[in-house]
Amino acid sequence: MTRNSLVDEMQQVQLAIELIELGARLQVLETETEISRAKLIRLYKEVRGMSPPKGMLPFSADWFITWLPNIHSSLFYNIYLRLRRGQGCERMEAFVGAFRLYQDQVRLDGAETVLGLTRAWTLLRFFESDLLQLSECTRCGGHFVAHAHSPTHDYVCGICQPPSRAGKSRKRQRAVATPAAAVQCVS
């Protein structure tokens, strides 16, 4: 084994470890690294202490268009593009960096992350397959995830024009209805 191939293999393992730590599924690891499935399963068990989850990956672009996932997906993808185009990062370097920055930003805002690593990776693949595009909001000028080839001349984002039930989940309603209980827990 040459020095270059050893370095490349070490970089592949490091990428796999980073992706596993961030919550990648086995299918993501198989696609993005050249490591065998058997080695990835062993590595996953070593890093996570359990076997990788089974099941299919998300396959519908529609999830990224719904209100809250659209806001989070748009944030992540704009960060990704900034790292790729503005900073000149390689694809997976930009992907991992964008996902970490997305998580940090959401935590700073005191919100919960909506976009997991596998969904973020699927989003990236949908853009690469020309299933999704960024559309500019005619009100705020932000760029948001939309179906590819959809008209953009009067596009309004979900932040400028949220749906009537936006942010009214049962969990949120309970939290708003019992602020005194939340204060008591803190003090």
Image (cartoon, rainbow, N blue to C red):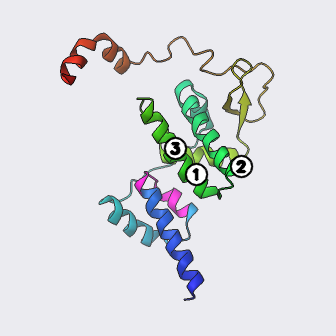
**Magenta highlight: main SS:** helix
Residue at screen point 44% across, 50% down: 55
Amino acid bearing label 1: Phe
- Front disc: 3 or 1: 3
In the displayed structure, would residue 166 be above or below residue 60? above
Asked which secondary structure carries label 1, the reply is helix
Residue 116 in percent (x, y) is at 47, 43
- Mark earlier in primary sequence (3, 2): 2
- Mark earlier in primary sequence (2, 1): 2
Magenta span of residues: 21-31
User: Gap in Å between the C-alphas at discs 2 and 1?
Assistant: 12 Å
Q: Is residue 54 magenta?
A: no
Labelled disc at residue 95: 1
In the displayed structure, would residue 75 be above or below residue 164? below
- Mark earlier in primary sequence (3, 1): 1
Asked which secondary structure carries label 2, the reply is helix
Residue 43 appears in the figure: yes
User: Gap in Å between the C-alphas at discs 3 and 2?
Assistant: 16 Å
Quadrant for the N terminus, please. Answer: bottom right
- From the viewer's side, name the closer residue of 65 and 178: 178
Residue that mark 2 sits on: 85
Amino acid bearing label 3: Leu
Mark 3 neighbour density, 10 Å: few (under 14) some (14–19) many (20 or more): some
- From the viewer's side, name the closer residue of 84 and 124: 84
- From the viewer's side, name the closer residue of 168 and 55: 168
